[in-house]
């Protein structure tokens, strides 16, 4: 089968790229990656398989750091893992286009709003638990960066959630009730037990969550400072453009090529390929 690569040009914001991809996708199964990640071998297959075998509409992947030896990057990675099953990661996900546009019409949209700051979170708010799944074998590698970038990431997370809460309150409340059990800590604890595969995995997930909570409390002033900077930019220029110019994009620009060699030791090069229509 011939390999087809088509370059699509759009404004330098993810929602525009998402809409352009949907307009030009020849088949019903669409896979979306961040610009600063390297997919592991079989990542695409795992993301598409989740759509077909489990009849899901939206399937998310999991991000791991390039480095196997950098203790700081591995630590930051471990802090992000507890969120993996609660949040759709924009680093890698797949969706069934026909069903997605049914959701758009149901919620009163014709496409993804182009000025979103937290586009992947907005996308998840359209769905239910039965329609969404995270596939742990669908791995992409990324540059976790330093600890300051982790704190910036927490500020971006806060701003992103606030954006949905303020601009799309119905979607936010739907997500809160569907994925976060209305914020009830006991129900969240029960959900973690259901998702954990064994006591040790449960203990590990709860321990990482507790460590992350403690770190965020300890560095709350730094996170607040970063948040205020982002909020000021957001209010003056719009969400998507703030993310496009954020420190995460700047710090990882070019790193994907250098660090990709490390990830390539674990996985062979993944060539783009077409998928059959359903």
Image (spheres, rainbow, N blue to C red):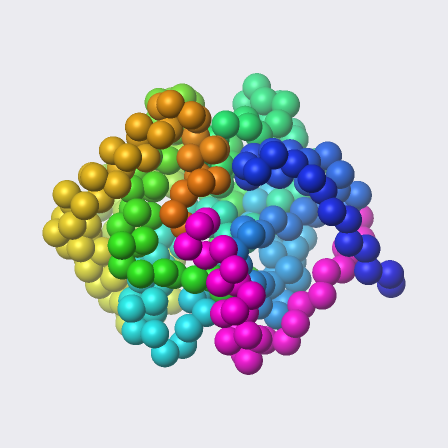
Please determine whether, in this image, residue 271 is positioned above or below residue 183.
below
Looking at the image, which residue sits at the far top?
A: 108
Q: Position of residue 132 (x, y in %)?
A: 52, 45
Q: Is residue 183 left or right of residue 69?
A: left
The image quadrant of residue 26 is: top right
Q: How many marks?
A: 0
On the image, the x and y values in percent for residue 173 come to 37, 27
Which residue, as the protein is rendered here, is positioned at the far right?
Answer: 1
Q: Is residue 120 magenta?
A: no
- The residue drawn where x is 42% and y is 73% is 67
Task: Depth check: give the residue in front, 209 or 91.
Answer: 91
Tell me the quarter of the image containing the N terminus: bottom right
**Relative image position of residue 33 (x, y in whole percent):** 58, 52
For the residue pair 75 and 195, the one nearer the viewer reads as 75
- Locate residue 271: give its quadrant: bottom right
Residue at 55%, 23% in the rendered image: 107
Specify the farthest residue to the left: 218
Q: Please give the range of residues in magenta.
A: 249-278
What's the residue at 77%, 54% (across, down)?
A: 5
Q: Nearer the viewer, residue 106 or 208?
A: 208
Q: Is residue 251 left or right of residue 25?
A: left
Q: Position of residue 83 (x, y in %)?
A: 36, 52
The residue at the point 43 percent across, 62 percent down is 143
Asked if one can make out residue 52 in the rendered structure from this viewpoint, the answer is yes
Is 274 above or below relative to 105? Answer: below
User: Is residue 139 at all visible to an observer of this figure?
Assistant: no
């Amino acid at each position: 089968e011939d390999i087809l690569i088509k370059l699509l040009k759009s404004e330098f914001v993810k929602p525009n790229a998402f809409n352009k991809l949907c307009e030009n996708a020849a088949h019903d199964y669409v896979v979306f990656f961040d610009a600063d990640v390297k997919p592991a071998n079989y990542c695409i297959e795992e993301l598409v398989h989740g759509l077909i075998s489990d009849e899901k509409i939206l399937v998310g992947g999991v991000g791991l750091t390039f480095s196997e030896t950098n203790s700081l990057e591995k630590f930051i990675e471990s802090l992000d893992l507890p969120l993996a099953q609660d949040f759709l990661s924009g680093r890698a996900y797949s969706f069934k286009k026909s069903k997605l546009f049914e959701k758009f019409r149901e919620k009163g949209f014709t496409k993804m709003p182009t000025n979103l700051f937290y586009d992947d979170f907005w996308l998840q708010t359209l769905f239910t638990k039965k329609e969404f799944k995270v596939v742990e074998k669908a791995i992409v590698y990324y540059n976790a960066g330093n600890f300051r970038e982790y704190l910036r990431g927490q500020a971006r997370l806060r701003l992103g959630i606030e954006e949905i809460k303020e601009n799309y309150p119905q979607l936010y409340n739907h997500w809160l009730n569907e994925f976060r059990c209305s914020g009830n800590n006991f129900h969240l604890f029960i959900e973690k037990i259901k998702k954990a595969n064994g006591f040790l995995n449960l203990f590990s997930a709860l321990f990482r969550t507790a460590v992350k909570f403690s770190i965020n409390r300890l560095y709350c002033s730094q996170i607040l400072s970063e948040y205020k900077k982002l909020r000021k930019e957001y209010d003056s220029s719009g969400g998507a453009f703030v993310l496009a110019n954020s420190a995460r994009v700047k710090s990882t620009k070019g790193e994907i090529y250098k660090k990709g060699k490390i990830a390539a030791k674990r996985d062979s090069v993944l060539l783009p390929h077409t998928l059959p229509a359903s």
